[in-house]
Each structure stands twice: as C-alpha cells, then as structure tokens.
Amino acid sequence: MTQILADTAALVTGASSGIGAATAKALAAQGAVVALLARRADRLQELKTEIESAGGSALVAPVDVTDAEEVSAAVARSVAEFGRLDTVVNNAGLIRMGSAAEAPLQDWDDLVAVNIQGVLYVTRAALPHLIEAAADSPRGVADLVTISSTAGWVARPGTAVYPLPNSVSTPSARAFAKRDSGSGTGWA
C-alpha cells in the first residue's frame, strides 16, 4: 500500500494527548516523519515509541507554545532533523470553564497565550519552511492546519471566556491563506 505522505515531514503541537496524539499517529501511518510538540515530554516519548513500533518515525520536542523562542527552536530542530517541513498542525489548546465574571484574569491570559499566541508563534516559525517545501513537495503542496472549536460561533453555558481565542484562530488561518495564496501552501 502506498503511503500518501511518504518523504514528507509534519509537526504537530499538543501531541501529548487527544486529537494531537491521534493526528500524529495518523500522519506517521501515512508515511510522514512527525515532530511531536507539547509540554509533557514523558507522554511525547511514549507516543514516539508507539509510532516507531508501528514502523513510523518521530522526533520528541518538548515545548511550551507560549514561548516564541522555544517554538522557533523546536521548528528549526525539526527542519534540521527532517530536512523539510510539509505539514503543520496547530492543535495545542486550552479550555477553562466558568463564568466570565468569576473567571480569574489568569484564565483569560492563559487562554489567549496558548490558543492565540501559540498558534501565531508556530505559524510564524513554520511558514517559511512550508512555503519552501511546497515548491518541491512530493504532493505539490504544504499544509497548515489549525484545530479550533465551534465555541467561536456558538455560545455554551460555562464557557464565557473560551470562545474568544476560537473566534480569532479560524479567521487568522483564512487571512494567512489569502495573504499567501499562490505559494503552494494549503490552509485549513
């Protein structure tokens, strides 16, 4: 069976659990080498072992997406190790439940730092590499995927602060797409 992502490299944030871990496994199963980014190094190592046991290849890069320098270093390390970067999945995210009136200001700050700034830091660091990879990609494109929630459009009880970052990440991805359309980089 041909692996559609053979000879490509991917980077997944929030890879230590949930959607991020499942995405990393799926990318590796299709032949991509995968950089695993998250804060929990022990879980990343377990995921790397699981991917490699299934015949894939992965790189563990413990990182806090709210630290622009850590993010840039992790992206640079991934590109140095893999020689390219074809796919980025911005999946790292944070949710805080509760009333906006009662939510500590730190909850607001944490949501903005992870769910907005983290996406922007990863995108900024990865974008030049994605554009470069699109020029000679085995698939003819590179992909930037941003995982978001419907919370940006649909209000739910107990999530008054959470919708803010979600209402920003999707339009930001669309803005990147309009700005860099024609670069061979696909945006989702």
Image: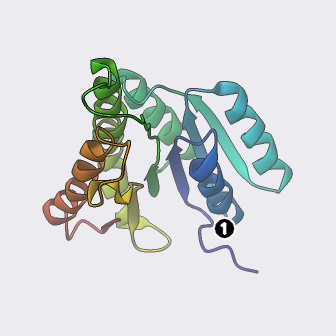
Choose between 127 and 165: the one closer to the eye. Answer: 165
| Percent x, y of residue 66 | 37, 26
CA neighbours of label 1 inside 10 A, class few (<14), some (14 to 19), many (20+): some
Does residue 51 lie above or below 1 as drawn?
A: above
Q: Position of residue 47 (x, y in %)?
A: 73, 42
Q: What kind of residue is marked 1?
A: Gln
Image quarter of the N terminus = bottom right
Residue 101 image point, x, y percent: 24, 28
| Furthest residue toward bottom | 1
When the figure is inspected, residue 58 is found, relative to residue 89, above or below; the finding is above
Q: Position of residue 181 (x, y in %)?
A: 19, 68
Q: Name the residue beneath numbered marker 1.
A: 30
Q: Label 1's element?
A: loop
For the image, the number of numbered tags is 1
Q: Quadrant of the C terminus?
A: bottom left
Residue in view at x 59 percent, y 42 percent: 15
Residue at 67%, 44% in the rendered image: 58
Query: In the displayed image of the protein, which residue is found farthest to the right?
Result: 53
Q: Say whether residue 157 is left or right of residue 19.
A: left
